């Protein structure tokens, strides 16, 4: 699914990723944990292709293709999905129109016809129910005036509609109360399948009680410094990150 | 006197008009002769040359008959509708008029008294040269007069259709709205043209008096296409605790110049004015707004947004003048512009003049790019860069459209503007279902 080899990246002339390596196979759930400033969000942004993140070394292979040869939108259509830590508010652009445009773009890419407005409406209403988001939110501007929890549920809804093969959740748990966290987690769990992989980026172990990972990696100082099973998360919760950061230097 | 001025006078002399308008017309004709024709050095016409207008010297008036059928699409609003085709009233597509609405030519003695009291009086001095011309050409118009404490049962919907003619037409439109104390009304002014190419010159002047504690919702929508030259103005007096909610929109055409002159004349008056302009190709739109705070405790909130595409040009001049006695004024003016081509041009100038010391005022004008983070967000969902840009451009004005209180106006404008941006608005409509 995804093979990251010796990845270096910088933001505003500052080196953030320094030789990161990670392989994700189909069906696996990988958690990436680490202290603030370790490069967790940078990884998601680099993988999705955001401007301002300069790759200075290494390679990323996504479903057998060189990821860096693809534009932002092409990566998305190929099945890469980044759930944003801070979903963007776009007043004036209706959520419904936005969702349909993204689904249509993906369908076209796969050689399918676009959905009719009626078909899409039905699909969107069903999906919004699955993430406990009132259908009224479909009419509003994209994320406009949504609460933190509503924004995250809107992200999961997009993920469900787009059915990506690789989902990167960037601190999806940040700013969520326990109810919203459960809705988000059960949405993710419902999407787990042998063909779909997840990278769950989080600062806290809490989310991993709900989305149980196959692997836990610790990202510190721009590299993966430790890898283990789900029990590693508990250990980190107890001991913090300092002992690993020291090892990493 | 310029050729244009001379021709305009000749035209005025040929007109038939009600005797009781003679005084106003004669005075206006005299004023018109003395107007010094603006050049590029004239501040108020700096960016809007009148050359193209002068090239098409008004040749004739539309004949009262033979206007043909109107195939214009009206706003689906349950309203009292008055349709004018090239300036001539079209009874066939108009509604029966309630007692509060009359054409000048049909005014009874009482209504003539209202006209005598207010017509031409809301316009400030002679600085509005085309308002002077409108007076000189005055032969008919619409009076809406709402008595004290009354609320109009339905909105008044005035449509001016410019339909194709071989020769250039001069269309003189006039509207006078007088709301007595505590009266309420909704007025929709709608300008459209049929699809055929044409060169008409539309001079449309509205005068509005909103009495003590009265409330007005006012729309002025300029949707005429390419070759139409429209010079229009809305002059308003707001009396004590009067409230006006205004919305205006202009698609581009060869020349479109719209002035809003609003006077806060009574304490506690409130103005909420929003505008959108969308010139494309080689079109031009020029909005000049001039809000005068003469008395204390009045509020102005003004928001204009424009998207300028291709080689089009937009001008926005927003003036708020706070006189020395106008303490406790609250005034806000925002103008945002989006240029979607590197040949597009906008000249924006907010002018805030404050001569009172206890006021709260803010103004801002920006010429912006689309938000890069939002573009990235849309792209990260598989939407192409180009489509994301179009979606966001439309979103930039849709934000204002969504706040239009009259839903029928919103429903009329949305699909038409969406079409300009290639957006499919069936989704929006269905979300309501």
Image (cartoon, coloured by chain):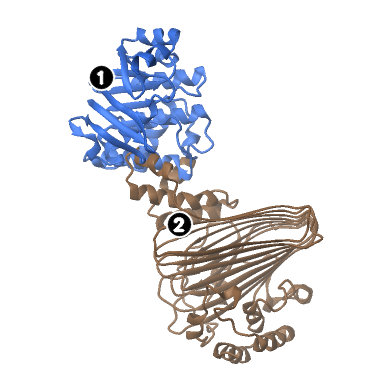
Query: Badge 1 sits on which subunit?
Result: A
Residue B95 seen in this snapshot: no
Up the image or down, B245 lies above or below B190; here it is: above
Query: Badge 2 sits on which subunit?
Result: B
Label at residue B221: none
Can you give x and y, in whole percent of width and height, for residue A68 in the image?
Answer: 24, 37
Q: Secondary structure at mark 2?
A: helix
Residue at point 60%, 84% (across, down): B37
Residue A154 seen in this snapshot: yes
Q: Are marks 1 and 2 in contact (CB under 8 Å)?
A: no
Image position of B121 (left or right of B390): right
Q: Which chain is brown?
A: B
Snapshot quadrant of residue B14: bottom right
Nearer the observer, A69 or B91: A69
The residue beneath circle 2 is B417
Label at residue A27: 1
Snapshot quadrant of residue B21: bottom right
**Which color has been applied to chain A in this rendered view?**
blue
Q: Residues within 10 Å of mark 1 (few under 14, many from 20)?
A: some
Image position of A161 (left or right of B392): left
Q: Report how far apart the C-alphas of labels 1 and 2 lie in the structure.
A: 45 Å
Can you give x and y, in whole percent of width and height, for residue B327 in the image?
Answer: 80, 55
Can you give x and y, in whole percent of width and height, for residue A138 in the image?
Answer: 46, 37
């Amino acid at each position: 699914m995804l093979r990251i080899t010796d990845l270096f990246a910088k933001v505003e002339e500052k080196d953030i990723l320094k030789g990161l390596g990670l392989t994700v196979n189909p069906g696996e759930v990988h958690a990436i944990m680490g202290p603030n400033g370790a490069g967790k969000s940078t990884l998601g942004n680099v993988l999705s292709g955001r401007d301002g993140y300069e790759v200075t070394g290494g390679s990323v292979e996504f479903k057998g293709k060189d990821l860096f040869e693809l534009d932002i939108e092409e990566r998305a259509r190929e099945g890469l999905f980044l759930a944003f830590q801070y979903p963007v508010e776009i007043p004036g652009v209706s959520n419904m129109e936005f969702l349909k445009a993204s689904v249509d773009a993906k369908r076209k890419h796969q050689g399918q016809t676009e959905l009719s407005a009626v078909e899409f409406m039905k699909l969107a209403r069903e999906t919004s129910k699955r993430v406990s988001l009132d259908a009224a939110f479909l009419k509003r501007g994209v994320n406009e005036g949504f609460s933190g929890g509503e924004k995250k549920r809107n992200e999961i809804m997009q993920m469900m509609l787009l059915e990506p093969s690789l989902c990167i959740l960037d601190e999806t748990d940040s700013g969520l109360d326990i109810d919203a966290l459960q809705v988000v987690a059960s949405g993710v769990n419902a999407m787990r399948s042998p063909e779909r992989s997840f990278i769950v980026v989080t600062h806290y172990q809490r989310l991993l009680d709900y989305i149980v990972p196959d692997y836990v990696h610790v990202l510190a100082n721009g590299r993966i410094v430790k890898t283990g099973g789900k029990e590693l998360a508990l250990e980190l919760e107890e001991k913090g990150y300092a002992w690993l950061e020291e090892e990493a230097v | 006197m310029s050729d244009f001025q001379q021709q305009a006078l000749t035209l005025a002399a040929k007109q038939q008009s009600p005797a009781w308008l003679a005084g106003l017309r004669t005075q206006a004709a005299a004023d018109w002769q003395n107007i010094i024709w603006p050049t590029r050095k004239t501040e108020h016409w700096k960016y809007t040359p009148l050359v193209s207008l002068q090239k098409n010297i008004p040749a004739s008036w539309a004949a009262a008959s033979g206007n043909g059928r109107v195939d214009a699409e009206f706003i689906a609003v349950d309203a009292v509708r008055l349709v004018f085709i090239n300036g001539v009233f079209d009874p066939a597509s108009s509604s029966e008029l309630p007692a509060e609405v009359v054409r000048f030519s049909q005014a009874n003695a009482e209504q003539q008294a209202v006209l005598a009291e207010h017509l031409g009086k809301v316009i400030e001095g002679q600085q509005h040269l085309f308002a002077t011309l409108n007076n000189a050409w005055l032969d008919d118009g619409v009076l809406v007069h709402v008595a004290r404490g009354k609320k109009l049962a339905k909105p008044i919907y005035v449509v001016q259709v410019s339909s194709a003619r071989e020769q250039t037409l001069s269309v003189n439109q006039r509207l006078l709205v007088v709301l007595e104390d505590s009266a309420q009304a909704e007025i929709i002014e709608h300008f459209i043209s049929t699809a055929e190419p044409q060169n008409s010159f539309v001079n449309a002047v509205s005068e509005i008096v909103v009495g003590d504690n009265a409330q007005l919702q006012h729309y002025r929508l300029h949707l005429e296409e390419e070759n139409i030259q429209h010079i229009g103005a809305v002059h308003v007096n707001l009396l004590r605790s009067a409230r006006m909610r205004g919305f205006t929109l202009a698609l581009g055409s060869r020349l479109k110049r719209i002035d809003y002159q609003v006077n806060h004349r009574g304490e506690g008056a409130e103005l909420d004015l929003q505008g959108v302009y969308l010139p494309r190709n080689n079109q031009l739109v020029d909005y000049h707004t001039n809000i005068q705070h003469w008395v204390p405790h009045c509020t102005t909130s003004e928001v204009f947004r424009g998207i300028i595409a291709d080689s089009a040009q937009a001008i926005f001049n927003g003036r708020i003048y706070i006189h020395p006695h106008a303490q406790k004024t609250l005034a806000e003016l925002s103008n945002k512009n989006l240029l979607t081509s590197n040949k597009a041009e906008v000249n924006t100038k907010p002018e805030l003049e404050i001569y009172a010391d206890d006021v709260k005022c803010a103004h801002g004008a920006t010429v912006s790019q689309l938000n890069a983070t939002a573009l990235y967000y849309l792209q990260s969902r598989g939407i192409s860069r180009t489509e994301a840009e179009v979606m966001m451009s439309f979103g930039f004005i849709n934000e204002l459209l969504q706040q239009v209180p009259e839903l029928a106006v919103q429903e009329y404008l949305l699909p038409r503007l969406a079409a300009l941006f290639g957006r499919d608005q069936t989704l929006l409509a269905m979300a309501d279902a």
